[in-house]
Image (spheres, rainbow, N blue to C red):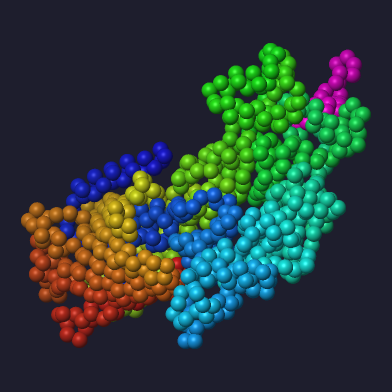
Amino acid sequence: MRFRIGLGVVIVLIGIYTGVTSADRARGAVLFLTIGPGARAAGMGESFVAIADDPTSTYWNPAGLGRYPLSSRWYDFSLQEDGLKYFASVKTSRADIDFRRFDQWVANETSLWLLRRDRWFSMEEYIVEDPDGESVNSILREFTGLSSYDSAYAKILKQKVMSYNSLTDSIVPMDTKIEIPFEYFVPESITALASTEKILWIGTKAGLYRYVSGIWKKMDEPESPKGLINILAVDDRDNLWVGTPSGLYQKQGSKWKHYSTSEGLPSNQITAIYAASNRNIWVGTQRGPANFKGAAWKTDFLYKVPEHVEWVETGEDTSMLAKTKISWEELVEELCGAKGTQRKHLLIANLKAHNRIPEADTPPGEIMVPYNLVLPAPVSAIYVDQLERVWIGSSLGLVRFDTDKIKVFGWRAVTIDNDISIEDFVNSKWSDISETTKQHILEKIRAFGFINNINLKNGEVVEVPSNPVSGVIYDMDKGFTGSDVLIATEYGLLRYYPQLHQFRYIMTGGLQDKTVTHLENHSGEYWFGTNEAVNIYSQGKPGVSLMHVRWLPELAEDIYYEYLTGVYYLEDWGTIGGAVTFISLGKSEQTNEAGEVLGTFYSYETALTGSYGVKFFPNLYAGVNFKVIYSALAPQIYVGHEKKSGTGTTFAVDIGFLYDGPISGLSFGACAQHLGPDIHYIDAAQADPLPRNLKVGMAYRVINTDYQKLIVAADVNKEIIQFKSPENSWMLEWRYAVKHIGLEYSYSNFFSLRGGYIIDYDFYPKSDSLEKINADNYDFDSGDYTSVNYFTFGVGLHYGNFTFDFAYIPRVSDPENKGANLPLSNIQRFSMTMEF
């Protein structure tokens, strides 16, 4: 937060500098900085300062880096009904680049909903097109494999559809719309959801259902699970794993395989599944976790018992390095951090029993440690992070397996300082909470610490809850960055920062007041399921964009312009970007005072830009660019006795703001560009100003539906080398400002059509006024310039993460030279953008 406030101060100071900037009205040097990159913006008449939603924001308005899609955004899709328990995302073939690529299915025990793009659906729809009508059974076959359903229910389904649509005849006439609620296809109580890229799997109290390509089907294969489905999961090969009270089922292709305690599972009651890969499956059961790596189920791991190493005196002035075995108490402390007196004793007894050494006074060199050693409650969630650490949740909190150790979170040790009953201990320690909560804590302390007695003794150590991860763990999944972990608990949604070894609440997206029970992520999109809504976090989209232009083709063949930019979102910090701008000015001849050609030289100019944008306040975004500029107009050409070449270097800053207006789809933008010291080549006294200018504009999304979008935008671009000449009226200054108007129509995020119009009254000097304009004492006169007003056109094609854009400025005839074209016309721009 301090960093963002600091950025705001910088922006304000630069803004003050903008207001007092003053120099000659000339457009300044390094004019290549005024060439707007990106064929998309060019096709819209360069009206882009209030849009700035692709990587070229590093030029048009760095504040765009702080706004979606370049930065992250939260969405809240609420339902009018609550009790949501089950969630699954199915990837679609839509061309969207964010969460809209997925259909999100949500269910409670009796109902099923679909979130498609930005809308909720609860039923299938069908319009009869046959002139002779269609039967209800025929319509149902459009959506179901009726033969997979029980024949009695097939009749009931027909009656339900007729009743729901108020049909009196089984033949439905033409143009009738038939609606069929999703839950009609899944008559049993829903207990689980899961998905592959194309298939939705639905678990119920009476078996398994499948939805794919618009067809509902009950799985009735002989070997498929028939009763209650506890949980579903899919691995990276799209194999389905089904947890039931009678064991674990795997569906691989058309084959089913069943695992139970006979194959090594701790219990047949499956409570959690995490498919790290098709050959690395973790399951939680009523009696702890187990791991399957393609051969057999494993329920324990090998632990090498550490030894004490110390120097032991062997005689006068001599000693030797000796090793001694640690005690059982030291072992369980080292292994899993156990502190509680009674808990230690039970853990030791369990280790001895598991290794069949009940009488061993000290641990052997190696022992087998059961995964369920520190888990007195059934497993409720499992997750394997990027470092291959296994996180296991239960009603008593969170445990992590770190290769050969067990880390228990959320509990700390307290030493009892006098004999006291456990009830009185809880009452004294949590005196200001409700009796219900006290009872809840009491039960947790008993279960976690394996405490069976009523009284605690003086000096005894008891472990008590210390943070939210001691509560019920509902779900876990990959965090926003690196090896972060998201953890949904009964006390709220937490994020684990491995660098800080800390858990912190997620206080954004409106989730601070909700109980999250489901977590899911795909390709930088995150779904958070609550009792009444789906909250979606769509991460900022990194991307690169490049453009190549033959600049001024009517004037010269060897002048071209290149622009390369890239942006990357940094979680919790904002979005950074960088850009390289280059213009080749071609070859020129070097002559002496007599006009003799001495040789040729190559001229070019370039700039390196670093950008940063961030969400500054709700609906307000700010950004800044830092530029280093190098101009080589006449390199290797030396002038005067000091032998100075015709090159110059300087730096500049851009600042920008974006504001999402009170009307949905309306935004305003402003960006002050190229603010910095003048540039000089030979003589510092003859320095030239940078082409400082101010862009302000607005954009409005007139249409923003699933398949069609229309944006209208308008910008005003005003030079601020001298913001207002004293002799000019404000109306005259407004006339000198360049106006831009643009449109962009997009269909299905696949095709875009653009058009624009630019009004520029003073850009092009008249030929007979050049000598006057170049005089030292020149006073600006609009009559010395010809207006340059022209249309622009553009198209864009989107394919996956790639966008190809083309823009064209048609030929504009020169008003002074009949038959000739203006240098700034007949320009074709090509650019390509790739988002990751």
Asked whether the viewer can see residue 233, the reply is: no
The structure residue drawn at horizontal position 65% and vertical position 27%, both measured from the top left corner, is: 442
Looking at the image, residue 138 lies above or below residue 8: below
Q: Position of residue 177 (x, y in %)?
A: 46, 74
Q: Is residue 242 magenta?
A: no
Looking at the image, residue 518 lies above or below residue 334: below
Q: Is residue 219 left or right of residue 265?
A: left
The structure residue drawn at horizontal position 42% and vertical position 56%, both measured from the top left corner, is: 68
- Quadrant of the image containing the N terminus: top left
The structure residue drawn at horizontal position 70% and vertical position 67%, both measured from the top left corner, is: 219
Count the labels in the image: 0
**Residue 817, quarter of picture:** bottom left
Q: Is residue 261 left or right of residue 826?
A: right
Looking at the image, residue 358 lies above or below residue 43: above
The structure residue drawn at horizontal position 39% and vertical position 54%, both measured from the top left corner, is: 67
Q: Position of residue 530 (x, y in %)?
A: 53, 48
The answer to which of 448 and 801 lies nearer the viewer is 448
Q: Is residue 330 magenta?
A: yes
The answer to which of 273 and 163 lies nearer the viewer is 163
Asked whether the viewer can see residue 287, the reply is: yes
The answer to which of 229 and 804 lies nearer the viewer is 229
Which residue, as the protein is rendered here, is positioned at the far front? 168
* Residue range (magenta): 309-334
Q: Position of residue 786 (x, y in %)?
A: 15, 73
**Residue 679, quarter of picture:** bottom left
Q: Position of residue 425 (x, y in %)?
A: 64, 19
**Residue 749, quarter of picture:** bottom left
Q: Is residue 747 left or right of residue 385?
A: left
